[in-house]
Amino acid sequence: MRMMIIIAMNTCREGIRNQVLYAMVFFALAMIGVSSVLSRLTMGQEYRVLENFGLTTLSIIGVVITIFMGVTLVQREIDRRTIFALLSTPLKRYQFIVGKFFGLVAIIMLVVGSMGLLFVALLILVDRSVVVYIWLPIAMTIMELTVIAAATVLFSATTSPVLAAMFSIGFFVMGRLTGSIGELSQLVESRLARMIANRLLTYLLPHLELFDFRAAAIYRQAVSTEQWLFALCYGMTYSLVLVIVASMIFERRDIT
Amino acid sequence: MTASKPIKIDQVTKIFSTDLLKKPMIAVNQLSIEIEDREIFGFLGPNGSGKTTTIKMLLDIVRPSRGSITIFGRDARDPTSRAVVGVMPEQATFYDYLTASELLTYYARLRGVDRDIRATRIQELIERVGLQGHQQRRLRYYSKGMLQRVAIAQALLAKPKLLILDEPMTGLDPVGRKEMRDMIAEARDQGATVLMSTHILSDVELLCDRIGIIIGGVLRKSGKLETLLKDHGETTDIHAGQIPEVVQRSLESQGAVVRTVGTATLVRAPYSLQQLVITALARAEVSIEVVMPRSKGLEELFLAEVKASEVFTPAVES
């Protein structure tokens, strides 16, 4: 565990010292700031517009940061040859992969968490009651980003950054559309095709919609403990499986 | 005294299958090397000969297709075998967002250098490699030579029993090369075994106890430097008076080279023929002025080996 923490801390430090990250955070905060002004133009819907805009911005910027940071996470170490000095220590390859994943998650928590806090502070100025509802979509956005981070680490460990970026974006889009694909698959006449589609959707494709609690927060709907707990367990299990697969593939790989 | 050899490479072959449609590339072919305790072993070869691939296999970065590698008796695939190894990678580039101090702390933690001695050891090494005053600067502002110094410092962090140096002299000026040679020799004097791959043959002649020449993934020559030079390069120059034509032809037929300059003659013959030439000249009553053994340098030996490698298959240097 010690080795993984050392790798994670350095990965996190790399992220924090990356100026592109600050540009993205600045952009996100500017968007939220603009939305607070725009929301005043709407009649009686200002909280909802502000909350919706803010949560969506957090999610989108979070995805961009995760993919941007994640896709080069492993390959950059190989391209810059820094991995040779790393693997010449008693570090095991799976520790390297898991450490990298933890580091990326730490960056996400730090960036999205701090943006989330600023967003909540802004909301408090407008409507104090919202705080009860808003923590859940922010926490679940971080969980969703953790799943995407696990996928990008898998792609980064197995392919080039360009392909990893394409696969990661595909993973995100598929994950967000799994529900719609499921509904569409029911229209297919063939039972076999429906069954294959169901299995594929159930076990293979990510269900990122599970982490979307924005509507519930904006319309002040109660969310059962089972519902968010299930999403949390699903996200953790899915991430764990992806990181294990990434470690197994990286373990067998010749690093050239 | 360690019972097991610091490095034992036994019949190792590495084949890269890069593309389904392309023919697999043999980067290293049935390589066997044993490196003795506390020696400096020079690993020589032209570009793409398989040196870096071999070093990568030692560190389990690339896996052998066949054969086995042990480090102090432990399988090289076992990460614990690297606990006693310090490595300086080729063309060292590090995390440019870190300072030298931060980088060395990072590697010291990974190498398990005790927290109590970590700061002292890092400071000691920074001074040893001549980077004092620069340790708080980020590495992106370092020159290539300075990065090489950081690289050797990180390799020496945990006082390794085995040092693996891939092209350690690259990017260094003559002063830097001298300092690097001193540090390598010092590490050996303190008990470390050194495997060094380099193109700079003069450094090999100055530093190495034994060498191995690898060409096209095949080890062409291996042994003590003096022995190899003597076996494959030593000749004798004999300066004599005028030699009768019959004697000259006789010597040339046995492999000697005879050159006449005015009334003097130079006979250059393999060392093994020295006595025969002297006897022949004495019989012909030719005056012998100077008998001078002459060693060929490592460069000549190296180039001769490259030329002699009849089946040269370009290997993958990845």
Image (spheres, coloured by chain):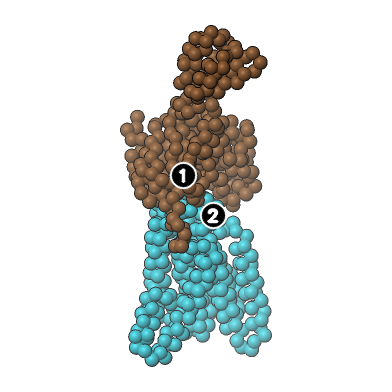
Chain colours: A cyan, B brown
Q: B257 left or right of A88?
A: right
Q: Secondary structure at mark 1?
A: loop
Q: For residue B150, which quarter of the picture?
A: top right
Q: Residues within 10 Å of mark 1 (few under 14, many from 20)?
A: few
Q: B263 left or right of B110?
A: right
**Observer-nearest residue: B130 or B235?**
B235
Q: For residue A48, which quarter of the picture?
A: bottom right
- The residue to which callout 2 is attached is A79
Q: Position of residue B236 (x, y in %)?
A: 52, 19
Q: Secondary structure at mark 2?
A: helix
Q: Amino acid at mark 2?
A: Asp
Chain holding disc 1 = B
Whether residue B240 is situated above or below residue A254 in the rendered picture: above
Report the residue at 59% width, 33% height from top.
B177
Can see residue B242? yes
- The answer to whether the residues at label 2 and label 1 have Cβ atoms under 8 Å apart is no
- The residue to which callout 1 is attached is B311
Can see residue B181? no
Report the residue at 57% width, 14% height from top.
B243
Q: Position of residue B78 (x, y in %)?
A: 36, 47
Q: Amino acid at mark 1?
A: Val
Whether residue A140 is situated above or below residue B218 in the rendered picture: below
Report the residue at 34% width, 85% height from top.
A192
- The CA distance from mark 2 to mark 1 is 32 Å
Q: Position of residue A21 (x, y in %)?
A: 60, 63
